[in-house]
Amino acid sequence: MNPVLQSEIQELIETIHYRPAVSIFLPFKPVITSKEILGQQLKASMEEVEHHLLKDFPGEVAILVMQKLHAIVGNLNYYTHKKSIAIYVSPVFEKILYLDIELEPKVVVDELFGIRDLLYSKKQPRDYLVLLVSGRNERIYLGNDTHLSAIVSAPLRPAYLHTNDITDFSKMPERKRIMMEKSLRHTDASLGIIIDAYKLPVFVIGQEKILEHFKKITRHSASAIEYIAGYYEESSVAELQELLAPRINNWEEILQQRLLRKIEEASRKKKLVAGLEETWKEVMNGTGNFLVMERDFLRTAEKTNAFRTLPAPPHSYSKFSYIHHAIDDMIEKVLQNGGDIEFVDNGMLDAYDGIVLLK
């Protein structure tokens, strides 16, 4: 028999023997969610798994996998402070990950595992902040798809600094210019407190001259996803929502632009490594917690045989676990260390060889 054909037949036999590969992704916050509610969510997921197994696989295989799944669920850690869980079960493999990222509920029953499946189940809430910079007071809003509400609305600068006085900083009297500078820095400090608390991207709105100056002094440019110039000091919440709507509808682009700013800032601060080999070293040393790569990076790395430059791993990769190669290995390591992973469009990380790690 042709050796290639024989190898393919053997691989098919092995795949049949080791399938199905069951993955369950769930939000899991026992610290703030009752055990009863969590139990209901787990029960619903397990019933969905059982339905798939009984429909598509032999009865003895379904029973075996369900027994293993019940054992895992029966031993979950209800004292964890993590946010989600990922459960993996097959006739020959089982694993549970407690994660610091938010996941949407999802069940996957497939031929093989893919650790990247859980990244496609990440929650991407459309939450954001809005800083309205004006000549009299600053307002900060918290927003999402449907709602916008003020969380800071207080005068942060002297009352005599009226809007008409600040349309051109170069013509402003020296004392007022100094006060304006202090006021904008105060505003930026207040914004920093809010960003630290909410960890969200920010739209900054204000008159063009004010925005130009604010851009020069802000310490939070990585979080500012867009500066919107115009006179909106008297705008209602509804008018601000209407202004932001087209931008919110293009949310994925917003997140990617925010990621690029973070990467650029990390690069300036020497807290970034780029390229497969350097990223691999840092991840394996546990010195980075935010991995970003282009969507087709794995395919490109396989095509160019880029993995050959990496040291031999301390363990062998297996197509029957969820770790098939070096990329999966890095993803697992970052997640287990409480970190996060994001994908961006192809070409966005050309300057960084397609993959970066923020330290």
Image (cartoon, rainbow, N blue to C red):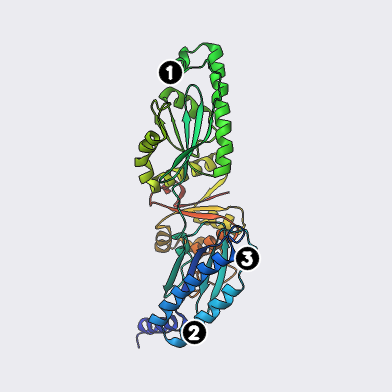
Q: Residue at x 56, y 58 (%)?
A: 83
Image quadrant of residue 163? top left
Disc number for residue 167: 1
Disc number for residue 63: 2
Graded by Cα atoms within 10 Å as few (under 14), some (14 to 19) or many (20 or more), the crowding at tag 2 reads some
Image quadrant of residue 76? bottom right
* Residue 223 sits above or below residue 215 on the image: below
Q: Are marks 1 and 2 in contact (CB under 8 Å)?
A: no
* Residue 308 sits above or below residue 167 on the image: below
* Residue 5 x, y percent position in the rendering: 35, 83
Q: Nearer the viewer, residue 144 or 227?
A: 144
Q: Residue at x 58, y 77 (%)?
A: 71
Evaluate whether residue 17 shows in this view.
yes
Graded by Cα atoms within 10 Å as few (under 14), some (14 to 19) or many (20 or more), the crowding at tag 3 reads some
Q: Residue at x 63, y 62 (%)?
A: 80
- The answer to which of marks 1 and 2 sits earlier in the sequence is 2
- Residue type beneath disc 3: Tyr
Distance between mark 1 and mark 3 Cα atoms: 57 Å
- Residue type beneath disc 2: Ile
Graded by Cα atoms within 10 Å as few (under 14), some (14 to 19) or many (20 or more), the crowding at tag 1 reads some
SS label for mark 3: loop
* Residue 48 x, y percent position in the rendering: 44, 73
Disc number for residue 78: 3
SS label for mark 2: helix
